[in-house]
Image: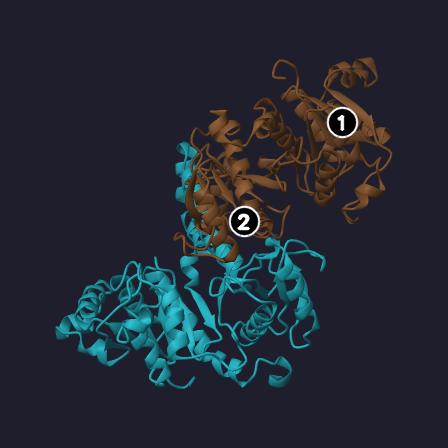
Chain colours: A brown, B cyan
Amino acid sequence: MASTKERIAIDAMGGDHAPDEIVAGAIRAAEELDVRVLLVGDPQKIRACMEKHGQKHGRRDREESGNTEPDLKSNIEIVPAEDAIAMHEEATGVRRKPKASINVAMDLVKQGKADAVISAGHSGAAMASALLRLGRIKGIDRPAIGAIFPTLLAGKSVIILDVGANVDCRPKYLEQFALMGTVYSKYVLGVDKPQVGLLNIGEESSKGNDLALRSHELLEANPEIPFIGNAEGRDVLSGNFDVIVCDGFVGNILLKFAEAVGEILLQIIREELPQGIRGQLGVGILKPNLKRLKQRIDHAEHGGALLLGVNGICVISHGSSQAPTIFSAIRLAKEAIDHRVLDRLHANYSLEKTN
Amino acid sequence: MASTKERIAIDAMGGDHAPDEIVAGAIRAAEELDVRVLLVGDPQKIRACMEKHGQKHGRRDREESGNTEPDLKSNIEIVPAEDAIAMHEEATGVRRKPKASINVAMDLVKQGKADAVISAGHSGAAMASALLRLGRIKGIDRPAIGAIFPTLLAGKSVIILDVGANVDCRPKYLEQFALMGTVYSKYVLGVDKPQVGLLNIGEESSKGNDLALRSHELLEANPEIPFIGNAEGRDVLSGNFDVIVCDGFVGNILLKFAEAVGEILLQIIREELPQGIRGQLGVGILKPNLKRLKQRIDHAEHGGALLLGVNGICVISHGSSQAPTIFSAIRLAKEAIDHRVLDRLHANYSLEKTN
């Protein structure tokens, strides 16, 4: 798989800014990451967006030949889908609309025509579609959404799961999340000895709610999980943990809070720094540094989250995703493909056996 | 009460930097806020800290007279306590050590010798002591810790409760938290019509875990709660909500995460902005603006959280509190006293009746 281009199916009709921004992000990824992107949805609309963004990117070849064929034949392909699930619909819509773009995209993975799928549409629908079309990996009761956060330590990330797939969890789900997170951390993020934590309100094993207390016991007792103890809210971004497990209720609130905090901070910076004459001058001088600061804080750089535990590589992006986020999501999918995360999860999720 | 000085008891022996930083913060508050501070603990140690920090503050009167009497007689009083609860002890230590500083401080409130109590020590011990010594307000099953967060809207705060007192909650607890939060928002924060939200993973009433779904029903059905719906993680700091309720497990994780994020962001700013010659120059020019920025982000500005539902005003500060945080905590206690929050909660927690 590593010798050929990664084939990534994208639900072009899903998301607040679909298909326009989805297509724009896909074009950039097809160019810069050299992956093969399969845009799933209404061919006419997709083609219109491709022309618009293709021109923006200043592609001489197409302008000269006067049609979009060269792009279609190279790294971008349009896969028609008659239907789509809107953001306000019920997740169960995926059952009523078999030809919805998200279902068609999932089928591409199932049929071996794509190596991964990305959706910025209705996340509940994407999960339902993944479960229906791809099914679960053996041994996993509940797939989990794993979000990758940057940490205080430069270049080090932490994967947090579940951030929204399962609002009410049982201890054994958290145990399975820990195993999947460990595999991901080890093989995709390249952490030699991942350190796994349980999100909790104190360091001591006696701390926590009922779920945390019982999960702590399971995590501690499982020799295949490199569990180092509880992670408090303050430890999430410290870099001391490589994998943090929690139920999808807490995880989702944390994820959305974290994203918003970044935006709020950027706004406070925009409000406070330019004040007064000194402010105006200082901000002008600091422009390149402020840009770098923005990059470190902005969540668009992180792309999306992985739906782990289904029988295929699925990236779930924000409904609000614009082109840069889609680009990052494609990069995330590419990494998961290149590092054969699915094979690793499939073969077993025993670290002992894969060593 | 407003005509006389607010009397605030502080556990001088509680916290990672006790008694030194506690005393330093208390001295500043006694001077700047003109409150009467009762420092509870080992008199010798407290007096030594007072001399050290009194001198730092450059008090001419004392230096001239050569003793600390003038301070003791005015706004600062030492109340001896033989014992103390260390940070690593069990919360139940408050039962075994009746003369611990936290117990003596609580008793001052119970006996009407102080109007509020502050602790930066073992928070579980402070809660246990408050429950044992002060008891609960009638109608409240479980006291909650309410943390006040700044929001994106300048000058607007949101109170979030519970942030750690109750890890496993029942729907009616959250209903009571909402009532207490509403009273606090209305009478202390001065919000005419507080907007109450339930922390959840989606806007729709059908979203959430079992606790959230059942709490949503209660909140919606109670005419005394100005409930406007679910608050997602991204809404916490938006300024759209005045009160947000959640169980103490989620709330504590959110609180600690939020505090850490503030510190992390300040560190990223410190790392990125001064880079290069332009960076050095720009940062020099922006110094006053950066200071203002730090003030808006730094959690030390917010002082601590309120233990609502016990029969007395209690402020719980971070174990890591230094003088500026203690100063802010005293200001928070003063505001709660001035706005008669306890009377308001006592009289009833019915907004209808108090109108």
Query: Horizontally, is B193 left or right of B320 in the view?
Result: right
Labelled disc at residue A286:
none
The residue sitting at the left extreme is B66
Q: In this view, does B278 lie above or below B245?
A: above
Cβ–Cβ under 8 Å for marks 1 and 2: no
Q: Residue flagged by tag 2: what amino acid is it?
A: Pro
Can residue B340 be seen from the camera position used here? no
Find numbered disc 2 in the image and state the secondary structure of the residue it sits on.
helix
Find numbered disc 1 in the image and state the secondary structure of the residue it sits on.
helix
Q: Residue flagged by tag 1: what amino acid is it?
A: Leu
Does label 1 or label 2 sit earlier along the sequence?
1
Q: Where is residue A9 in the image (x, y as percent from the top left)?
A: 73, 28
Q: In this view, does A18 lie above or below B142?
A: above
Labelled disc at residue A171:
2
Q: Do labels 1 and 2 share a chain?
A: yes
The front one of B197 and A91 is: A91
Task: Give the number of the mark in front: 1 or 2.
Answer: 2
- Chain letter of mark 1 equals A
Q: Where is residue B186 in the image (x, y as percent from the top left)?
A: 57, 75
Q: Name the residue under label 1.
A: A108
Q: Where is residue A195 in the image (x, y as percent from the top left)?
A: 43, 38
The front one of A262 and A230 is: A230
Query: Horizontally, is B327 left or right of B236 in the view?
Result: left
Which residue is drawn at the image coordinates 67% and 75% (left, top)?
B222
C-alpha separation, residue under disc 1 versus residue under disc 2: 34 Å
Q: Position of residue B88 (x, y in %)?
A: 31, 59
Which residue is drawn at the image coordinates 47% and 44% (left, top)?
A219
Q: Quadrant of residue A126?
A: top right
Q: How crowded is mark 2: few (under 14 residues within 10 Å), some or many (20 or more)?
A: many
The front one of B196 and B67 is: B196
